[in-house]
């Protein structure tokens, strides 16, 4: 057993070079500076005190650096997961801030347990049931909900905690007249600084700049006395050891949201990790090890006063652009956060809550994708429908219902497409032995007495009726002169027991009508299945051919016996 498979840090650390340190140091400091305002803002979004956002970017970062296979992925709180955390804990109606924190720790533990378990049992493929249109629709809707949830901090108005857009809009309409204009001005100013400050210089840490300006304004003009809400006391020191709840009643309530966070978090994390890894050919990603690493990072959050974490799009992109070569960059970011916790938390006392809301609003604005639905409308209406349904359900019925609906839609589409395999009637390209779909080309050569069909997909219980109905329609259309059906199985990877039984019935029923049957171009596993179910014997070994041309020559009595015998094993041989 190669331990480096389970501890990827042992793969790169022994080979670590001084030349890599420059890039890792630059990236680590850059991302660490980003994490300070982001971590605090996302903690607030999750319903926690800002300090817990800083706790969530210490131990989890270091644990991912040890166990993760991506060398650029930046792990920590993200907007989507923070919103899901707030939604999940809100359903338990905690009675105090301590109880709320306990539920957050428990949620992180459950997310870690699910992701770790999925990795151990190699279930990374499960996330494939979240198709890209579903993720797109869900993400865009969640971004809108996240944005609306920050209005109360940006306008300083009282709004109920909700994840239903209709309730949020009604509440905003009813309370908009109470807007605290000074708070609003600070928030809008912060949005402008964060969004457009990089035009001054691309490496400018605009979120931190907005934080510094906000603190300076509040301190210099005593704006807190004028109604601007500030963060207040931020505890200093490192996170102490914490423990999640092991109350199974709490677990049963949190499991659905934990499962949602596990899948959505991993999908987001692995998607960005794959995108970045494509630019670096010196390592490989392992989806199951990534699940294990994210699971362990969430265990770290649970036992060191954090909340659920995952890999983030923006931070990972910045990490890569800033020169990260290995996960040493994440270790450096964590060290910077530790130094902040030890020595600099007092600096955040006068930080306006509106600034943290601005950080979240700018971050999630990039998650709303308008191009993809337009593109899908033009090119794939079924995927467009999945995107829109997921988007609307998430907006109106909530985060959990939205992602569940998206998964059901994705799975339903898989089943639908699997139950309707592509099928084609074939004709010969003039002057060749090549056969193509007669619907696509008008000049193909066909024999009136022969129906040649290619099935593109497995023949199994879910699609045999569709295949049979289509075959019956084609047979009926040529019934007057039809003498032979040739079934091309070159694109059939497998045949199950139901498929074999039905195929046997088709052969017998067609022959009862005086229609002969030939089978061509079978793959090895398909021949094995046909042999197990006595279908080679049923159709006849002399009616099994290596290709379509041989079958036609046989029907025309132009296939020499010695040629047929020479190639027969390639058409009939089984294990």
Image: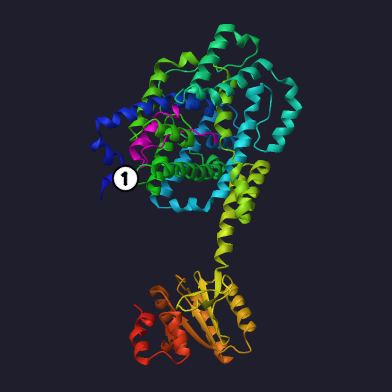
Q: Residue at x 44, y 70 (%)?
A: 493
**Quarter assignment of residue 165:** top right
**Quarter assignment of residue 189:** top right
**Residue 575 lies in the magenta stretch:** no
Q: Along the horizontal axis of the image, is 422 left or right of 12?
A: right
Q: Position of residue 172 (x, y in %)?
A: 72, 29
Observer-nearest of 213 and 215: 213
Range of residues picked out in magenta: 55-79
Q: Along the horizontal axis of the image, is 23 left or right of 490?
A: left
Q: Is residue 483 above or below residue 268?
A: below
Q: Where is mark 1, residue-wise? A: 6
Evaluate whether residue 47 shows in this view.
Answer: no
**Residue 70 lies in the magenta stretch:** yes
Q: Is residue 536 above or below residue 414?
A: below
Observer-nearest of 480 and 190: 480
Q: Position of residue 55 (x, y in %)?
A: 44, 27
């Amino acid at each position: 057993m190669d331990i480096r498979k389970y501890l990827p840090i042992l793969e790169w650390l022994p080979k670590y070079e001084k030349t890599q340190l420059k890039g890792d140091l630059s990236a680590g400091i850059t991302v660490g500076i980003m994490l300070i305002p982001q971590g605090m803002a996302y903690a607030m979004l999750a319903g926690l005190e800002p300090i817990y956002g800083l706790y969530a970017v210490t131990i989890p970062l270091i644990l991912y650096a040890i166990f993760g296979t991506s060398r650029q992925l930046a792990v920590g709180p993200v907007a989507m997961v923070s919103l899901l955390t707030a939604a999940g804990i809100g359903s338990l109606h905690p009675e105090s801030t301590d109880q709320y924190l306990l539920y957050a720790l428990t949620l992180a533990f459950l997310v870690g347990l699910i992701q770790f378990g999925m990795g151990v049992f190699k279930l990374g493929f499960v996330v494939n049931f979240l198709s890209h249109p579903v993720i797109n629709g869900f993400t865009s809707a969640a971004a809108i909900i996240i944005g609306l949830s920050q209005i109360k901090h940006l306008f300083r108005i009282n709004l109920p905690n909700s994840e239903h857009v209709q309730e949020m809009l009604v509440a905003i309409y009813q309370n908009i007249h109470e807007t605290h204009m000074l708070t609003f001005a600070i928030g809008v100013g912060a949005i402008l600084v964060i969004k457009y400050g990089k035009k001054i210089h691309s490496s400018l840490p605009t979120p931190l700049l907005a934080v510094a300006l906000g603190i300076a304004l509040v301190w210099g003009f005593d704006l807190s006395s004028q109604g601007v809400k500030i963060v207040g006391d931020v505890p200093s020191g490192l996170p102490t050891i914490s423990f999640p709840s092991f109350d199974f009643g709490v677990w049963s309530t949190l499991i659905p949201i934990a499962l949602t966070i596990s899948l959505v978090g991993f999908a987001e994390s692995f998607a960005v990790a794959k995108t970045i890894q494509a630019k670096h050919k010196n390592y490989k990603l392992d989806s199951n090890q990534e699940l294990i690493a994210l699971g362990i990072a969430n265990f770290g959050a649970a036992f060191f006063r954090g909340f659920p974490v995952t890999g983030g799009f923006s931070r990972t992109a910045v990490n890569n652009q800033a020169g990260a070569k290995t996960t040493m960059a994440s270790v450096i970011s964590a060290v910077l956060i530790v130094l902040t916790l030890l020595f600099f938390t007092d600096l955040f006392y006068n930080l306006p809550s509106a600034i943290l809301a601005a950080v979240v609003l700018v971050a999630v604005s990039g998650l709303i994708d308008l191009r993809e639905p337009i593109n899908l409308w033009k090119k794939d209406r079924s995927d467009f429908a999945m995107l829109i349904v997921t988007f609307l359900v998430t907006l109106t019925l909530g985060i959990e219902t939205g992602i569940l609906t998206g998964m059901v839609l994705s799975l339903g589409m898989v089943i639908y497409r699997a139950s309707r395999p592509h099928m084609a009637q074939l004709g010969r390209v003039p002057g060749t032995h090549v056969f193509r779909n007669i619907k696509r080309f008008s000049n193909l050569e066909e024999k009136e007495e022969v129906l040649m069909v290619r099935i593109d997909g497995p023949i199994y219980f879910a699609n045999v009726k569709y295949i049979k109905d289509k075959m019956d329609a084609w047979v009926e259309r040529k019934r007057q002169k039809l003498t032979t059906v040739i079934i091309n199985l070159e694109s059939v990877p497998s045949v199950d027991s139901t498929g074999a039984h039905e195929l046997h019935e088709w052969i017998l029923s067609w022959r009862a009508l005086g229609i002969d049957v030939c089978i061509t171009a079978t793959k090895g596993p398909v021949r094995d299945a046909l042999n197990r179910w006595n279908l080679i014997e049923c159709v006849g070994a002399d009616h099994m051919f290596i290709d379509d041309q041989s079958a036609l020559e046989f029907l025309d009595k132009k296939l020499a016996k010695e040629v047929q015998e020479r190639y027969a094993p390639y058409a009939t041989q089984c294990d």
